[in-house]
Image (cartoon, rainbow, N blue to C red):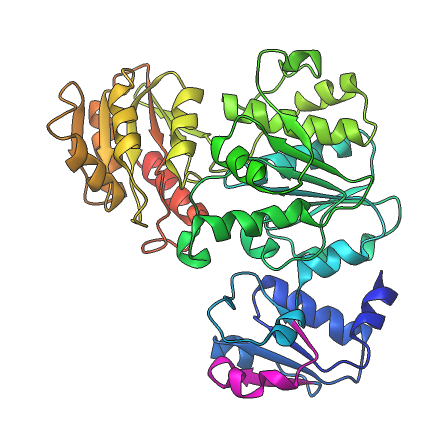
Amino acid sequence: MIDSIRNFFLGKKTLVWGLGMEGQATLELLLKTLPETLFYVCDRDLQALNAINNPWVKKIEENQLLKQIDQFELIVKSPGIRTAHLSFDPSLKKRIVLQTELFLRFWPGKTIGVTGSKGKSTTSSLIYHLLKQGGFKVYMGGNIGIPPFRLIPFADEKSIAVLELSSYQLENCRHSPSIALWLNLYQEHLNYHGSFEAYAHAKSNIARFQSIGDYFIYNQDNPDLMNYLLSQEKMPGIPVQLDGKEDNLIDLSRLKIPGKHNKKNALFAATAALLLGMPANAIAEALDSFQGLPHRLEYVATVKGVAYYNDSISTVPEATLAGIEAIPSVRSLIIGGQDRGIPLESFSSRLCELTMIENLILLPETGWRIGYLLKDKCTKKNIFFAKDLEEAVLLASRYTPKGYSCLFSPAAPSYHLYLNFEKRGEHFKNLVLQL
């Protein structure tokens, strides 16, 4: 694989655009495989640029890039850097590549890619866990926090790479994994992609470039995903559906993580493992030892008779509804975050219909929107407008009945307050432990 990458870049004037985790991994690999070759880097973060001290690296500030971009034969772009709004000519767009694309192109063994608006990390981790327990030589990377290029030292024909892939990593990607899983499709990242159609198109690259002998597994129960797939000329695959007959395929009874949505994630993971030849009984046994991931319906503590669950990963209404379904003992729901303009009327009505929820504890901005929608319509629930998460946890501790649960499942991001959902979840857990 190293030789293939070396030959791909050899003799080409190359720019690494973006110095996040993937960009740094790309630059390190290039400097190692092509020593004494001049490379260029660009980032809007001057601190990141100034941290590079190598005579074979020339730095370009992002506000100067457009003046110089035509000179580069290859541009390795980091995920999340927008190019759609730039007036690039077609030949320049062809010179822009992604680390994900290069990895999928040159990895010598099988590759498994997992995308979806929700459930990517859990499903990717489940696949990795199943295959590891099954004795396969398997490695995991991608959006889960490990740049794909970090897996290159382990590359051989028997190695399996499991990649969690975001829409940012799939955008403009022209290679697809051997086994592609598309879990679901909800309204996410619209500020970046510009439209739901553009977001769906980016996701679809996970299977668009597959070859004969590859597999595409998709969720037949997700309406938006099915509508998109049916609109495409040709995208055959293997449908996954919870119809009560899934236990005929694999015994999911030993799965410990709660929720119907996690049962679906396990079915996706089991299907991938079956396609690689893992016996069904071995898969069922391996499911028993999977413990789940932080911030995904994570049990925090029981304080004064009330159990608290952290579902900070929830950034869309559909994920919150799945979380409520997974924990029948929920009586208090803490909800709300950054407003992206997504319609909330049907979600608000559904929350009002859920009789087990006694207390709706609403955070700015979307939580308050929901509160105003329900204030005069949902009279059987206690509706609280909390100014921040600290007040929300105190309200939950005061009003949740003993023997029942409080679920923190925001149904929105909070980038205006927290770096990521992990930081938000840690804040919630710390507040609970301080009660």
From which residue to which does the magenta span run?
A: 57-75
Residue 51 in sight = no
**Residue plotted at (41% across, 32% down):** 318
For the N terminus, the image quarter is bottom right
In the displayed orientation, state which residue is furthest to the left: 376
Q: Where is residue 262 in the image (x, y as percent from the top left)?
A: 55, 26
Look at the picture and state if 184 lies above or below 33.
above
Q: 296 or 226: nearer the eye?
A: 226
Residue 60 lies within the magenta run: yes
Look at the picture and state if 51 lies above or below 244.
below
Picture quadrant of residue 300: top left
**Residue plotted at (82% across, 39% down):** 213
Look at the picture and state if 192 lies above or below 433.
below
Residue 57 in sight = yes
Look at the picture and state if 263 lies above or below 208.
above
Q: 411 or 300: nearer the eye?
A: 411
Left or right, residue 227 beside residue 301? right
Q: Position of residue 356 (x, y in %)?
A: 29, 16
Left or right, residue 236 beside residue 326? right
